[in-house]
Amino acid sequence: MKLKSPILLGGLLLGATSAVSQAAVLYRLDGPVTVNETWNYAPPGLSLSRGPSASDTLYFRYTVTNPASNNTTENYYAGMSFYYQGGENLGVGNGWDPWAYSAFSGGIGNLDLKSANPEPGQTYQQVRSTDVTTIVFRVSFVNGGNDNITVWLNPDLNLTEAAQSSALTTSFSANATFDTIYLREGDDGVGPVAGGWTYSTFAIADSFADIAAVPEPAAILLGSFGFLGLMRRRR
């Protein structure tokens, strides 16, 4: 694991879109939203919360596209974070210490997420500027105790939850209570600003099938088709 520098915070928001609700989805923000050098970006209209007595299960999803903050550009943190009464309980994206996709909290520190496309000899995947990475995670809330969390890095959304590969599945326990959710990115304030993370397809649902059914925004799909076309022309 390659380590980064201690935290220093600043703020600038580059773009946002409005929330769209669907019958099978509790919350949806298509994006893209570029978050760069900001403490936090609160998705508009999101009012969900889960306190210490919660005992249900929620699923969360977002896609990060071509992250300008990555393993070659700057010391940074980024991801989706759960806050409760002003304190951060859990983040999923990239913590301060690892360059890899990771979960982070006061209770677990930084935990590398398993990847089906890991670095040689490792189980984790570093963040790169060419990535289009979808993260889905489940939080099973435990009344009065730490909550059970499972994260899938680039899951196959055509498969069921049970059929997801163990190579991209990371499970752990942590406090995930929240009254506010932020999309975040910031660096150590040293050197040039790299440009942040661009988030799309941020959604919350109460089943894996519902979260998997949220379509990717047209911008991501068009970008993917363009990349495939470029590959074909080069052959």
Image (cartoon, rainbow, N blue to C red):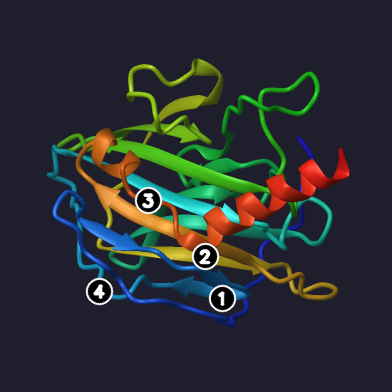
User: Would you call the spot at circle 2 few (<14 residues within 10 Å), some (14-19), or many (20 or more)?
Assistant: many
* Label 4–label 1 contact, CB within 8 A: no
Q: Earlier in the sequence, mark 4 or mark 1?
A: 1
Do tag 2 and tag 4 residues touch (Cβ < 8 Å)? no
**Which amino acid, mark 1?**
Thr
Mark toward the start of the polypeptide (4 vs 3)? 4
Tag 2 secondary structure: strand
Q: Residues within 10 Å of mark 3 (few under 14, many from 20)?
A: few
Q: With respect to residue 10, does 135 lie above or below? A: above
At x 48% / y 43%, what residue is drawn? 135
Labels 2 and 1: the sequence-earlier one = 1
Q: Quadrant of the N terminus?
A: top right
Nearer to us in this view, 100 or 159: 159
Circle 4 residue: 45
Residue 137, how many percent across, how many down? 39, 39
Residue on which the image places disc 1: 38
**Mark identifier at residue 184:** 2
Q: Amino acid at mark 3?
A: Pro
At label 2, which amino acid type do we have?
Answer: Arg
Mark 4: which secondary structure?
A: loop
Per the image, the residue denoted by label 3 is: 215
| Pointer 1 local density, CA inside 10 Å: few below 14, some 14–19, many at least 20 | some
Between circles 2 and 4, the one closer to the viewer is 4
